[in-house]
Amino acid sequence: MSEPAAAEDLASYLRGLKNKTGRSYDTLAKRLGISKSTLHRYCSGESVPPRFTLLEQFAKECKANRHELTELHRRWLSAQTAQTSAAEPGTARQAQPGNHDSSHPQLSGVVETPPVTGGLHGRLVVLRESRKRWTLGILSVLSVAGLLIWRPHHDPQAAAETTAQKSAGDVRSCTTRRGVKHADARQNGHVWTTDFVCANRPETSLYLTVGTTEKIAVLDTPKSWFVCWSLGRVQSDGGTIWYYTRGDRSEPGKEAWAGWGFAAAEYVEAVSHPLPDMPECRFAEPVSSSGGPPAGHSMTARPRSP
């Protein structure tokens, strides 16, 4: 399905859910914590929400049942996939036969000569012109041959390794965004104004705390934003860095956490962990020597401003 068709398919479903409630865009937008114009763009197909968490909250406000929520998630994934495919660069256009630059004629082995009209003098002129053209042609061929002979040695394996290294560097690079607004319902409405966008493994689980194994949400998309880091339990690769973010969808029965949780750094692509300039999650539960959170420690404390 093309990008516009997939976006409209999602938008029409959103309009259907909205119309069932009879509520205005303004009322729903205030409940979702976004502007009226943003919600209208989503419902008109002009743009697709980057995270499903917002649509999950929208569905709740519209009293959607489990079947409708599942269908909404399917359409959102389809729109996201179409959007990603459309953003990929296309293949280069191949040159069409006969499409040559007239200012650079090709060298030919046949030399066209004008009619001879001046006796011996005319024939001498033609011979001089022919010899001149052939000389220029031979010099051109020798020049190309010289370039080929003196070209530096090309190592295909080294070139492939360099390309792979550049690609790996691009994948592992993260982008810092300032001026964003992420309202954190889990932290008493605290608004995060800086995030860090990195590639991550799709379907990465988010955990309630850095010291437990209770899953509360999932990152569906291959690129996500993160707001702070914390030390936590040891991961399968031996790392102990965890990143705080909001998932694309909540695990069944875990909606109360609004999708906010911790992702293991082993599933986040970055040159180093933690990310440079990223603030530490001051509110996160520290991990005790026994591997669990200290007794009586709370995760609901308001974080310090990053």
Image: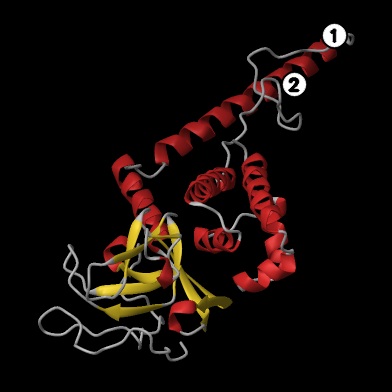
**Of helix, strand and loop, which one carries label 1?**
loop
What is the quadrant of residue 119 in the picture?
top right
Q: Which mark is residue 129?
A: 2
Pick the front one: 62 or 120: 62
Q: Position of residue 168 (x, y in %)?
A: 36, 56
Q: x%, y% of residue 290?
A: 10, 81
Please tell me whether residue 226 is drawn above or below residue 149 in the rendered image.
below
The answer to which quarter of the image holds residue 61 is bottom right
- Position of 224 with respect to 15 (left or right) is left
Looking at the image, which residue is at 57% across and 77% down?
181
Report the colour scheme: secondary structure
Q: Could you say where residue 174 lies in the image, as x and y percent from the top left?
A: 44, 67
Mark 2: amino acid = Glu
* Residue at 85% from the left image edge and 8% from the top image edge: 115
**Residue identifier under label 1:** 116
The number of discs equals: 2
- Could you classify mark 2 by the number of other residues whose Cα lies within 10 Å: few (under 14), some (14-19), or many (20 or more)? some
Question: Residue 13's spot in the image, x, y percent?
Answer: 63, 47
21 or 27: nearer the eye? 21
208 vs 243, nearest the viewer: 208
Visible residue check, residue 8: yes
